[in-house]
Amino acid sequence: MSETNDTVANTSELPKEIVVMQDRARNSGDLVDRLRSFSTLIAAANGLITRIKRITREHEKNLKQVEAEIEFLARHKAKEDLAFRTLRNTYSAPEKALETFNTLCRTYAPDYVMEVVKLGSHRLGAAIGMNLRGMRMAGRNEADVNYEKAVIPALANIVADQRAYLELKGTSLQDEHEEVPKFVSTIADQRLALEAAVREYERERKDAAISMEARDIKRLDTDEFKLRLALLPPKQRNAEMEALRER
């Protein structure tokens, strides 16, 4: 498939403002106006390409951050699950004990949270082996031993990152992880369409430059005159420059 056909096939991917400028440039029958219009169009399209590349880099960087956060959540959840299993051997309601711990983590610094935890199992909830009157019953000693040997070390292992974990847990990381690649793919298609279009615009601008007659050339300003010369095939450019020197 030719590049021209590629451009036509991808026209739907072009931004509306580029299509409007493109139609204006192509509908002009004046060679000078076509040179100017295509130059403006090329600059606008290249500006968008640069912007898309920058946005793509930013989103790819963000995607890496999201992936790192998802990995962090998975690693930390495994540690939290282990801590929860230790709570089950000390508390009659381990879910409530964990929520109390989480509340402390959301509110206070990790060092202070651990100071509270080390004050005793009663700080997180009702331990196994206590009746409604607060009397010790069978199983309480085992619960206390488990608290000292298993619960405290397990909570100490997660306390530093627990607040960050809880905050991330409440976000839509997975949705973002799925949407960012889709967005990057969409703007990549737009960038490819723009790059193909620019190649076509450059050819059409060059055709306008080559087709100009003396009356058209006289209407060019200095920069446009230099641009036109740069666009000409070497043989035509050398001939025109030689003609200028002979005047």
Image (tube, rainbow, N blue to C red):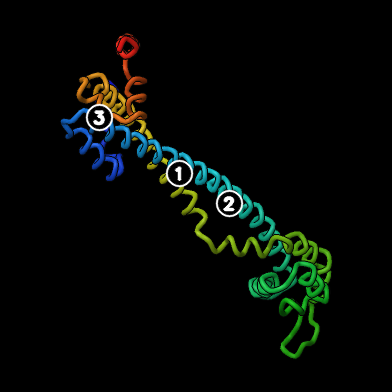
* Count of number-bearing discs: 3
Decide which of tag 2 and tag 3 comes sooner along the chain.
Answer: 2
Q: Tell me the residue that label 3 is attached to.
A: 219
Up the image or down, 209 lies above or below 65; here it is above
Q: CA distance from mark 2 to mark 3?
A: 62 Å
Coordinates of residue 79 in the picture (x, y in percent) = 69, 57
Tell me which residue sits at (28%, 29%) in the image. 220
Up the image or down, 37 lies above or below 129; here it is above
Please identify the quarter of the rendering in which residue 208 is found. top left
Up the image or down, 168 lies above or below 123; here it is above
Coordinates of residue 33 in the picture (x, y in percent) = 23, 33
Mark closer to the observer (1, 3):
3
Question: Which label sits on residue 168?
Answer: none
Circle 2 Cα neighbour tier, 10 Å, few/some/many (<14 / 14–19 / ≥20): some
Circle 3 Cα neighbour tier, 10 Å, few/some/many (<14 / 14–19 / ≥20): few
The secondary element bearing badge 2 is classed as: helix
Coordinates of residue 120 in the picture (x, y in percent) = 81, 76
- Outermost residue on the front side: it is 247
Mark closer to the observer (1, 2):
1
Decide which of tag 1 and tag 2 comes sooner along the chain.
Answer: 2
| Amino acid carrying mark 3 in the image | Arg
| Amino acid carrying mark 1 in the image | Pro
Question: Which label sits on residue 70?
Answer: 2
Residue 1 in view (yes/no): no
Up the image or down, 245 lies above or below 13; here it is above
Please identify the quarter of the rendering in which residue 82 is found. bottom right
145 and 192: which is toward the camera: 192
Tell me which residue sits at (25%, 24%) in the image. 217
Q: CA distance from mark 1 to mark 3?
A: 49 Å
Image quarter of the C terminus: top left
